[in-house]
Amino acid sequence: MSGSEAGEEQRVIAEQMAYYRARAPEYDDWFFRRGDYDHGADWNRRWRAEVDELRQVLDAARPAGRVLELACGTGLWTQRLAPCAAELTCIDASPEVIALNRERVGAEHVEYVCADLFEWRPARRYDFVFFGFWLSHVPAGAFIPFWSMVAQALAPGGRVFFVDSRNHPAGREGGYADWAPAAPPSRSRRRLRDGREFEIVKIFHRPDDLEAQLRTLGWRAVVRGTSTFFLHGVATPDDPTPAVRAAGQSC
Ligand SMILES: C[S@@+](CC[C@H](N)C(=O)[O-])C[C@H]1O[C@@H](n2cnc3c(N)ncnc32)[C@H](O)[C@@H]1O
């Protein structure tokens, strides 16, 4: 990556953090299909059914032990992870969403860390690492370092589980009112209720391509889509030893 490309990536990472800080009070409208995201009973029903499917797949993966949630947001997934976890560490760059998360989940065994995930390094290892609607916001140039950080965070035998958006035309029509295409296609322009606009990263991964990409990085991943809106994946490192060694060095 050239110096100017790296600088441009840093700029959009900073703008993305600013966007989610400003969006904190209205973030949940997207998930609960309220306001601009309400596209009628049929779409809402389909959305809720697919959210239920994600919840079931997550439950079936049996998160347990020491759990790490990256980009935890307002707690929509934290509230599901917390009852299963012996300890739960939640990372997010926005103090505003962390406050909302704390209010929603309010559990003593949940620790919050306000940090930029492109800088943060795990100081310990976890049995289960979860990220919801985060991977699509990782710029292409940060993809390998991000997965390397995740490997460092995993305990031997640990697993990664993620959910994200799927790029389906019906999904766009059905509920992404604030999305507008930006150039390049890995970017999206978002508008808040007060009219402020931000450019962020949005990369729609395709399940097969993502599996293949992760395979080249030494992960065994199974990624599947729900019928319209989402994808979910589980990943384990082929060889946990390098992750263990790397984690040892970073402590
Ligand atoms: C799409 S939201 C997902 C929130 C939550 N996981 C969910 O599914 O509801 C993305 C989250 O990433 C956080 N975020 C954005 N940039 C970040 C960064 N560089 N480091 C850590 N968190 C970041 C935002 O504050 C926001 O909470």
Image: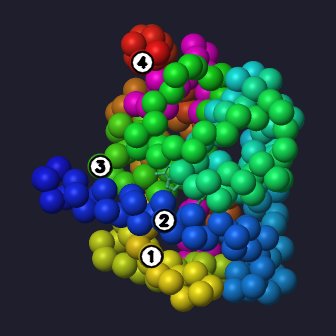
Please tell me whether mark 2 sits on a helix, a strand or a loop. helix
Q: Residues within 10 Å of mark 4 (few under 14, many from 20)?
A: few
Cα distance in 3D space between marks 4 and 2: 28 Å
Disc 1 designates what residue?
Answer: 198
- Name which residue lies at 61% across and 71% down: 23
Which is more toward the observer, 139 or 50?
139
Dot 4 and dot 3 residues touching (CB under 8 Å): no
Mark 2 and mark 1 lie on one chain; the one further toward the N terminus is 2
Asked whether 235 falls inside the magenta stretch, the response is: no
Amino acid type, residue under disc 2 in the picture: Ala
Q: Residues within 10 Å of mark 3 (few under 14, many from 20)?
A: few
Amino acid type, residue under disc 3 in the picture: Gly
Which is more toward the observer, 44 or 96?
96
Disc 4 designates what residue?
Answer: 250
- Tell me residue 128's x, y (percent): 66, 28
Mark 4 and mark 2 lie on one chain; the one further toward the N terminus is 2
Please tell me whether mark 1 sits on a helix, a strand or a loop. strand
